[in-house]
Amino acid sequence: MQLNNFSKITETDIFNAAKDNKTPFYLYDKQLIIDRCNAIKSMPNAFGLSVRYAMKANSNKSILNTISSTGVHIDASSLNEAKRAVLAGISPSEIMLTTQEVPMDEEREDLENLILKGMKYNVCSVTQYEAIKYFAINNNISLSIRVHPGVGSGESSTRNTGDNYSCFGVHLQNLPTVLADAKKCGVNFTKVHVHIGSGADPVKWRENIDLELSIIEKYFGDFNIDTISFGGGIKEGRMPNEVAADINDLGAYAKEKITEFYEKTGKKLTAEVEPGTFIVANSGYCVTSVMDKKRTGSDGLNFVLINGSMEINARPVMYGSKHPFYIVSAKGELMSSEFSEKTNNSSYEAVVVGRCCESGDSQCIDENENPIPRAMIEPEIGDYFVIGGTGAYCSSMTPFNYNSHQQIAELMVCEDKSIKLIRKRQTLEQLIANEI
Ligand SMILES: *Cc1c(COP(=O)(O)O)cnc(C)c1O
């Protein structure tokens, strides 16, 4: 049976993967990644659309190659990410770098080499602008600029990247000075970029389309802007009751506004989007095993202990995020799923915790850091406990070596349902290899 209505992964896929691989591991649905890329690529648009995958969501080489093979390009958030994409075989001309870093010394050399090979550089601060401007002028390279619009939206306050409490991009108040200097020196900006946050409210995402077009109109009259990037943050649903953004609606809205902009200014803008979460979040599952069960007294709580939690999915601890749970018996039957009525009506409720020596190591933490029990069919020790919606910001963003745990393996269910190992589990020797 399909575990949910996102992907075609079934309990049999989980069972087959777990038969030959020690838990915990990540399991990705390749077909869903491809489908999501194609869906985003066919969003309505006025004068062309280019899609960049925000690789920080999941940077595994096989995932990058899967995405790249659909014609989707790359958004890198650090110089190392850009280098890693190149190591995966992606051409620098398909990468844009949007980073808080100001590369110096050898890193500066690497940055320049990548830009000379075609990587697009997105200026994200006044300091970055000063550091890159003569290089850009001397090599006849056009730049992109990330604007901090003063408003943002995200799944939680720490995932909002557009308001006064975050410092991504050149703030609107600094923009006139930068652009006046750019005009004087002959710096060529051709792209304007705004990213308001991760998991943004679709209404806010729409509003940003208007805001960004008005920024281009108001400030960029002296430049030949040909591309408008709306950033990423397209909202995805992971839990049964969560609603994803309607990408056709967002695309249609952008198309209408970009067409109006053309009618007003005579300028045709190519649209660009940078989804990370939307492409990979629901493709991923953390497959763990139930190690133990406990109860904290008659007035306490039930606990289910699994062999991988905050060190493989830190999102609940970081953001209070909720992920769907599935329990597959040791024999391969689907016992519990939050996409089924039976599970949701179950009288058994438990807090799912991990193996880390950290009382916050739980998959059931709300935004106020309280443990909230979840309804499920009571698992047996030895059952597989599967955490869904873990394709984005899990493998790429966890404290995986805490308690000397090894970074876990990554597997992929291919289009023909065969299971491929795409990253081996780290060995204990690798974990200590650089210690002197
Ligand atoms: C993180 C990030 C994204 C992707 O955000 P998602 O919420 O994963 O879609 C896109 N663009 C930029 C600049 C980012 O920093």
Image (cartoon, rainbow, N blue to C red):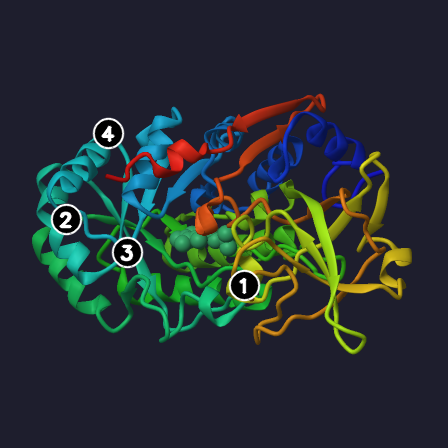
- The reply to whether discs 4 and 1 touch (Cβ–Cβ < 8 Å) is no
Q: Position of residue 254 (x, y in %)?
A: 53, 55
Quadrant where the image shows the N terminus: top right
Q: Nearer the viewer, mark 1 or mark 3?
A: 1
The vertical placement of 18 against 354, above or below, is above
Q: Position of residue 84 (x, y in %)?
A: 35, 34
The answer for how far apart the CA atoms under marks 2 and 1 are is 38 Å
Q: Nearer the viewer, mark 4 or mark 1?
A: 1
Residue at numbered disc 2: 132
Query: Which residue is outermost to the front?
Result: 297
Residue at numbered disc 1: 317
Name the residue type under label 3: Gln
- The reply to whether discs 2 and 3 touch (Cβ–Cβ < 8 Å) is no
The vertical placement of 33 against 182, above or below, is above
Q: Residue visible at 40% across and 48% down?
A: 268
Quadrant where the image shows the C terminus: top left
Q: Nearer the viewer, mark 4 or mark 3?
A: 3
Q: Nearer the viewer, mark 2 or mark 1?
A: 1
Q: Residue visible at 76% across and 32% down?
A: 15
Secondary element under disc 2, as helix, strand or loop, is helix
Q: Nearer the viewer, mark 2 or mark 3?
A: 3
Residue at numbered disc 3: 100
